[in-house]
Image: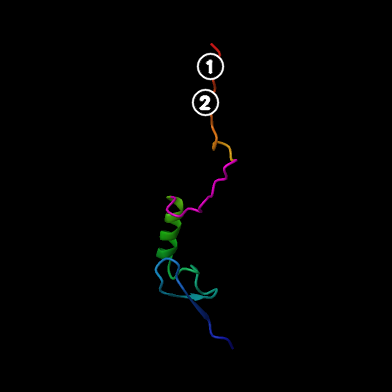
């Protein structure tokens, strides 16, 4: 029989059981899960974006008036 896998909680770093018995996996508790969800909801976590020189808006020019 294999012993249950133990991983680090992504929020607090404490040990967390990686098994169906842990309702909040990979987190160690509901609190850590809610803190992480709150960080995503408030845009504290962001995926970095690298803009290309040819993307829209990179070479934006004001329209000239036809007066």
Instruction: Examine the image and state in which quarter residue 66 appears.
Output: top right
How far across and down, in percent of the image, does residue 5 sit? Answer: 52, 80
In the image, 32: left or right of 5?
A: left
How far across and down, in percent of the image, does residue 63 sit? Answer: 54, 23
Check disc 1 and report the residue beneath it: 65
Q: Give me the residue at 44% from left, 60% from top.
A: 36
The Cα atoms of the two marked residues, 1 and 2, are separated by 9 Å
Q: Give me the residue at 54% from left, 46% from top.
A: 51
- SS at mark 1? loop
* Above or below for 19 versus 31: below
Instruction: Examine the image and state in which quarter residue 57 appears.
Output: top right
Check disc 2 and report the residue beneath it: 62
Query: Which secondary structure dominates the residues rendered in magenta?
Result: loop
How far across and down, in percent of the image, does residue 22 sit? Answer: 50, 72
* Above or below for 32 versus 67: below
Coloring scheme used: rainbow
Residue 12 lies in the magenta stretch: no
Tell me the magenta residue range. 43-54
Q: Can you say which quadrant of the picture contains the N terminus? A: bottom right
Q: Are marks 1 and 2 in contact (CB under 8 Å)?
A: no
């Amino acid at each position: 029989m294999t012993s249950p896998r133990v991983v680090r909680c992504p929020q607090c770093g404490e040990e967390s059981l990686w098994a169906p018995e842990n309702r909040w996996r990979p987190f160690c508790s509901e609190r850590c899960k809610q803190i992480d969800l709150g960080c995503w909801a408030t845009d504290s976590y962001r995926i970095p974006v690298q803009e290309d020189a040819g993307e829209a808006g990179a070479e934006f020019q004001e329209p000239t008036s036809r007066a």
